[in-house]
Image (cartoon, rainbow, N blue to C red):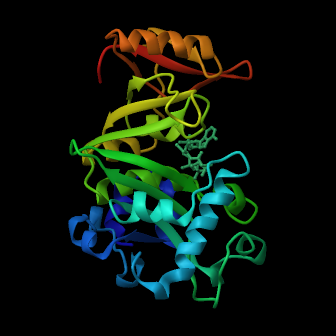
Amino acid sequence: MNKEILSKIDSRYKLIIDELEPYVFSGPESFSHFKTDVWGMEIKDENFISCLNSKRKNFFLNLQALDAFSFGPVGMPMERWVFFDCGEMPGGIFGFGTKAKNLPAEILKNYKEISSPEEFLPLSMYIAIPMVTGAWFGHNLCSANSVLKQHKEYKGLALLTKALGSLVFNITDHYGATQWDSGSLNIHLQLSPMELRSAFTPAHSFDETITYFSTYGEAKILAALQGSNVTVADYDFLVESKDRTKMVELQNEIEDGAQYKICGRPIYKDNKVFLPVKEGKL
Ligand SMILES: CC(C)(COP(=O)(O)OP(=O)(O)OC[C@H]1O[C@@H](n2cnc3c(N)ncnc32)[C@H](O)[C@@H]1OP(=O)(O)O)[C@@H](O)C(=O)NCCC(=O)NCCS
């Protein structure tokens, strides 16, 4: 990767920049619509991977393996047609990866198909899908850090993946859905406050899901990656991440026209997780 980026973001992400390779995976007609020189970031030609190229079959299988092992048994494992129909063809996938030869055997056993030491393996992915409004929907974010840890942890892998992915896809208006107790809130809220579009979501497989709206863009993303955690003292109230009654109450208020935003990263206290909420729009 070009050294220009190093001067802009926190040094804790240096290992990712120095050791891993970014990739873009989508339908081939989409490549030219993406911004692929973000902060001088170089994406090798062979790392623009077309979902229509049968010779890259191992990559598709290994991406599906990454989704399954990172989410674990309680996750929402995706069929390959879901990646294809709902992610790769209409939108895109951005992430970091490395060659098999750079990883020890105990990490490699999590993947499905490795035909040579040169096999390029995905270590993280952010899937974003364009919406009819011109906004984008963040469909999936995951990283291999939970298994990489035994070998070497790439701190900030998911954060950097979503942050740089949002710039590659040129996303300003962003929607997403996540659970109140998800650790990934640390990542989404590091990038931006989240306006609550729903606080309790029976349409989703997990009803304790937040649907959120955030705005991104280069200046905001750069600020998020400069090292200080987005913590806030200036909130109206806290929501405990398992408080279903409060979620339903907030949902009813939102449906009656109230506006709320989660304004900072989760607060961990007495073995519980709290989200700081403020009234109003972003
Ligand atoms: C959640 C997940 C994406 C985090 O990946 P990761 O690469 O370990 O995360 P990062 O290193 O980028 O973390 C960025 C920050 O968030 C914090 N964070 C990440 N996961 C966290 C968790 N589960 N609980 C608390 N904090 C967490 C990190 O400590 C780090 O904090 P810092 O800014 O103070 O250094 C990963 O564990 C995963 O793939 N989980 C399964 C899939 C999932 O839940 N995806 C989210 C769907 S919305």
Q: Position of residue 238 (x, y in %)?
A: 54, 13
Q: Is residue 172 visible?
A: yes
Residue 231, relative to residue 44: is it above or below? above
Residue 279, relative to residue 48: is it above or below? above
Which quadrant: the C terminus?
Answer: top left
Residue name at image x 44 percent, y 11 percent: 252
Image-based side of 121 in relation to 177, left or right: right
Image-based side of 16 in relation to 113, left or right: left
Image-based side of 275 in relation to 93, left or right: right
Of residue 234 and residue 33, the one placed in the foreground of this image is 33
Residue 241, relative to residue 78: is it above or below? above
Ligand 1 is in which quadrant of the figure?
A: top right
Q: Is residue 14 visible?
A: no
Residue name at image x 25 percent, y 64 percent: 34
Instruction: Single out the residue that lies furthest toward the bottom.
Output: 116
Q: Position of residue 231 (x, y in %)?
A: 48, 26
Q: Position of residue 239 (x, y in %)?
A: 56, 15
Of residue 203 and residue 117, the one placed in the foreground of this image is 203
Residue name at image x 78 percent, y 72 percent: 106
